[in-house]
């Protein structure tokens, strides 16, 4: 497991903990994100990802531990830390009464970007996310994908060195998702920015520098995608029995290897020796068989389990972070 990059850290997280009542959302989380690194946080609902992102964004205080953004403490130096951040929240945060241009201009004003540079940045960002023709349209008239592209543009109007993207492509179609990752790749190359992303689309992080898997508030694994697949992945065997009797027999015989069922298919954890043994015993009772090599998805499932999680967990974290005026996050 690789806990920290070799070079300097744009983001430093050391033993962060956060509790909501009896629920321990973060339990001593530690990691570093290097300069210009593309870093992903993966975890099921309720894993603590949103709580962690809110702490890094300076809108939620940890109970203990330290988080540094560009060397600035998010608790002791929140304004300095925030100036180095470009943030795209999970929930929409545009002012839909303003036009596309006005949303960008307002953000630049808030961050003190000089007028001439602000105009230049707005033109550059609109061109990048292909919204130049929509500059004078109110944000409420944009599609979900266009709004997300506008939020990415807004995050880069000021001199942000680090981008925090919380589920940036959630709910978008495949074409828009692909376009957004293309923008992020270009920005990273042109401006040498560090990017930290949370996502539920595991296939999106195959090309990332490193992936951190979190669950129940703890870091379970942290390394490059290839290293995670090598060290934590699981080869699966997808088989389709010839009949229901054969199906039930195989399910009973290999219950300890059952990884899941998908339609007619049975997924079993596997290795080369097991494939040979299965064919010798059940070869005549199997309609089809396919070997699935380790992937980030099998890494994720092997580390976090296969049970469904409460879909409201993420919303609860958001409510706790944003809904308590003068509550836990301000103490």
Image (cartoon, rainbow, N blue to C red):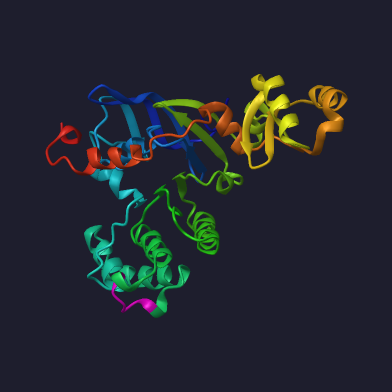
Residue at position x 35%, y 49% from top? Answer: 85
Q: Position of residue 22 (x, y in %)?
A: 25, 21
Quadrant of the rendering where the N terminus is positioned: top right
Q: Is residue 207 left or right of residue 3?
A: right
User: What is the chief secondary structure element of the magenta stretch?
Assistant: loop
Mark yes or no: residue 236 visible: no
Residue at position x 29%, y 24% from top? Answer: 23
| 212 within the magenta span | no
Q: Position of residue 323 (x, y in %)?
A: 19, 43
Q: Position of residue 107 (x, y in %)?
A: 27, 62
Q: Residue furthest left?
A: 326
Task: Say above or below: 105 vs 196.
Answer: below
Corner quadrant of residue 298: top right
Q: Position of residue 97 (x, y in %)?
A: 22, 70
Magenta-colored span: 134-139
Quadrant of the rendering where the C terminus is positioned: top left
Task: Say above or below: 19 vs 294.
Answer: above
Task: Say above or below: 207 vs 249.
Answer: below
Q: Nearer the viewer, residue 124 or 141?
A: 141
Residue at position x 40%, y 61% from top? Answer: 148
| 136 within the magenta span | yes
Q: Is residue 309 left or right of residue 7?
A: left
């Amino acid at each position: 497991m690789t806990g920290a990059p070799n070079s300097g850290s744009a983001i430093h997280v050391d033993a962060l903990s956060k509790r909501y009542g009896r629920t321990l959302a973060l339990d001593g989380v530690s990691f570093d994100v290097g300069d210009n690194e593309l870093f992903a946080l993966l975890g099921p609902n309720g894993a603590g990802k949103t709580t962690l992102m809110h702490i890094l964004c300076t809108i939620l205080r940890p109970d203990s531990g330290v988080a540094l953004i560009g060397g600035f403490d998010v608790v002791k130096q929140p304004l300095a830390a925030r100036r180095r951040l470009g943030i795209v929240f999970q929930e929409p945060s545009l002012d839909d009464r303003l036009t596309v241009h006005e949303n960008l201009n307002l953000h630049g004003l808030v961050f003190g970007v000089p007028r001439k540079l602000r105009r230049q940045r707005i033109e550059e960002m609109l061109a990048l996310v292909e919204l130049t023709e929509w500059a004078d349209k109110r944000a409420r008239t944009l599609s979900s994908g266009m709004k997300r592209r506008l939020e990415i543009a807004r995050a880069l109007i000021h001199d942000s060195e680090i981008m925090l993207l919380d589920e940036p492509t959630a709910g978008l179609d495949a074409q828009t998702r692909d376009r957004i990752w293309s923008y992020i790749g270009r920005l990273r190359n042109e401006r040498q920015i560090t990017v930290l992303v949370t996502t539920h689309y595991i296939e999106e992080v195959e090309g990332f520098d490193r992936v951190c898997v979190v669950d129940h508030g703890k870091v379970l694994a942290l390394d490059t995608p290839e290293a995670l697949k090598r060290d934590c992945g699981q080869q699966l065997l997808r088989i389709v029995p010839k009949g229901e009797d054969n199906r039930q027999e195989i399910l009973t015989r290999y219950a300890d290897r059952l990884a899941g069922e998908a339609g007619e298919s049975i997924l079993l954890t596997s290795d080369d020796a097991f494939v040979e043994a299965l064919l010798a015993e059940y070869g005549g009772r199997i309609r089809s068989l396919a070997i699935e090599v380790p992937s980030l998805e099998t890494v994720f499932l092997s580390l976090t389990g296969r049970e469904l999680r409460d879909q409201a967990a993420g919303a609860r974290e958001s409510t706790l972070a944003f809904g308590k005026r003068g509550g836990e996050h301000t103490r």
